[in-house]
Structure formats: C-alpha cells, structure tokens
C-alpha cells in the first residue's frame, strides 16, 4: 500500500515530526537539471520508524525512487530547493520536530528566460552555465522557530573534516542536533555517524549500521533531545 499523498487530518494529541528526504533537481531548461545522488533511503527509514513510534509524520520527499509504504505517513513531493522552501514555510509552524535529511542543492542554474519551457540546442562552442547560491533552508526556518521546536540537521562531510564541520553547522544554523556522516554515506546501504547536540554531547554509532538499523538508533536520540527540550 502506498503512503497517503493527499491531506489527512493527523491526530491532534500526537506529536508531529516533519522529515525531508532525497535530492533536489534544479532545472537548467525544460528537460535538464542539476541533481545529486541522494537516494532518500535515510529519510524514508526515519519516517517509517517515527510512525512506528507513534509520531504524526509528514515526509517531504524529493525526486528519489523510494517512498515509504506506511499508510500513516503523509507524503508530499518536491522537486527544487524553491519548492521545498515553500513546503517548509507551510509545514514547519505545525511541527514539533524538523529533521532535514534532504540533500538540498547549494547552487542552482540561473535559468536563461529564453530556455523556459524549452531546451537549448547543441552548438560547437563551449557553454557556460551560471549558478547562483540557494538559500540555506534549515538556517532560514531555524531563525523563525518557536522555542519548543526541535531542529535536526545533517552534515555530509569528508571524514577528516566531519567533526569540525558538524560542530560549525550546529552553531551556524542555530539547530539543536546535527548528524554528521562521512561522504560515503550518500547512496550507500550503510551509515556511520556522529551525533552532536547543542549542549556539547557527542554520540557515535557503535559500528557501521544499515540505514534501517540506524533509524531506530537516531530516533532514540531525537526523542531524548525532544524530552529534554519539553521537560
Ligand atoms: N541544507 C538546507 N538548505 C540548503 C543546503 C543544505 O537546509 N540550501 C540543509 C541540509 O538538509 C542539511 C544541512 O543543511 O540538513 C547541511 O547540509 P550540507 O549540504 O552538508 O551543508 P551546507 O549548509 O550546504 O554547508 P557546506 O556547503 O558548507 O557544507
């Protein structure tokens, strides 16, 4: 059975978690895009685990081939960073926890208006594509968050820089928890992670884990941070 894609009224007494997953596709013209190798598996596993633990779950999912099968999960699709920005503005105010597992593009093509709705043609000379930076969506929503909300980000980094970059992201994005993964995690079946919290705690995965085994491990830490926050 497929996850629900229409709007459903979630149980109001249950806590709500908003999870983003998968890549973004940033259009170059009507048929081409810049994307990345994110598979969406991590976010899907987290959404499935959160639903199993009784959370109201909304999964904002980019153009990835996977989708949760749990019918309790509200699934909303996005394609670009701009689509996701609109969805976050709509959904974050109604969420208790945000988990930003999506691999959002850092740059997008400045689409030449003459190619809107069409495609550019091959020519013999080189073609230069101009890219503009995208907004940092997590930092943006964290700026206007309520104090009772918990915000979780990811840091995908080369192993040697993982710890320092994850710490920097925690502070720069003003979030509560950051999950640092080495670059090899993207598009892989397994995960190795270090989780850092705002209050200075560091927790490492005991070993390389499957993404399915990792989901309960991480949800445990998210729920503990959530309990600390609302205590
Ligand atoms: N993220 C975001 N908006 C972006 C890019 C990333 O919200 N435009 C989120 C990701 O979903 C992730 C976190 O920010 O939770 C870290 O993403 P990452 O690409 O590792 O880091 P950047 O913020 O892009 O920083 P840098 O390029 O310096 O690594």
Image (cartoon, rainbow, N blue to C red):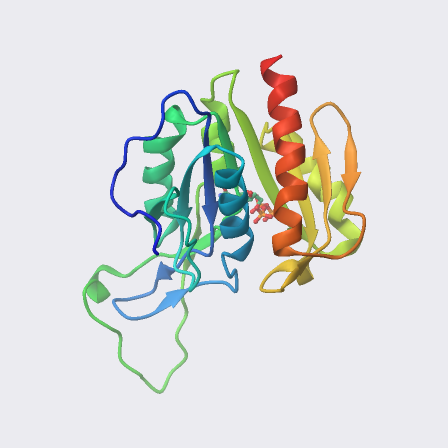
Residue at 51% from the left image edge and 49% from the top image edge: 43
Residue under the image location 43 percent in, 57 percent down: 131
Q: Quadrant of the C terminus?
A: top right
Whether residue 10 can be seen here: yes
Q: Nearer the viewer, residue 40 or 54?
A: 54
Counting from the top left corner in percent of width and height, residue 99 is at 52, 38
Q: At x 28% / y 66%, what residue is drawn?
A: 29
The answer to whether residue 103 shows anywhere in this view is no
Residue furthest toward the top? 231
Q: Tally the numbered discs.
A: 0
With respect to residue 145, does 212 lie above or below?
A: below
Task: Left or right? Give the position of 18 relative to 183.
Answer: left
Q: Residue at x 50, y 36 (%)?
A: 138
Furthest-bottom residue in view? 124
Taking 84 as reference, is 9 left or right? left
Near-viewer residue (172 or 211): 211
Q: Quadrant of ligand 1?
A: top right
Residue 76's place in the image compared with 158, above or below, is above
Q: Is residue 22 left or right of residue 215?
A: left
Q: Quadrant of the N terminus?
A: bottom left
The residue nearer to you, when weighing 53 against 122, is: 53
- Left or right relative to 57: residue 165: right
Residue 11 image position (x, y, % from top left): 36, 27
Image spot of residue 119 (x, y percent) = 24, 73
Where residue 20 appears, as percent x and y from the top left, is 46, 44
């Amino acid at each position: 059975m497929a996850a629900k894609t229409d709007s459903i009224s979630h149980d109001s007494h249950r806590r709500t978690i908003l999870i983003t997953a998968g890549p973004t596709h940033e259009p170059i013209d009507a048929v081409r895009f810049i994307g990345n190798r994110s598979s969406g598996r991590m976010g899907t596993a987290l959404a499935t685990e959160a639903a199993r633990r009784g959370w109201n779950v909304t999964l904002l999912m980019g153009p990835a081939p996977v989708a949760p099968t749990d019918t309790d999960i509200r699934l909303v699709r996005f394609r670009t960073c701009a689509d996701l920005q609109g969805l976050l503005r709509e959904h974050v105010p109604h969420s208790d926890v945000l988990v930003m597992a999506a691999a959002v593009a850092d740059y997008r093509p400045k689409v030449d208006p003459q190619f809107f709705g069409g495609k550019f043609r091959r020519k013999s000379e080189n073609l230069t594509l101009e890219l503009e930076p995208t907004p940092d969506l997590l930092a943006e929503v964290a700026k206007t968050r309520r104090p009772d909300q918990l915000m979780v980000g990811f840091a995908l980094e080369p192993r040697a820089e993982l710890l320092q970059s994850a710490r920097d992201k925690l502070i720069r994005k003003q979030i509560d928890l950051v999950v640092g993964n080495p670059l090899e995690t993207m598009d892989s079946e397994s995960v190795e992670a270090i989780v850092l919290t705002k209050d200075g705690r560091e927790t490492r995965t005991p070993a390389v884990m499957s993404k399915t085994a990792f989901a309960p491990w991480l949800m445990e830490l998210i729920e503990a941070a959530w309990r600390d926050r609302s205590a």
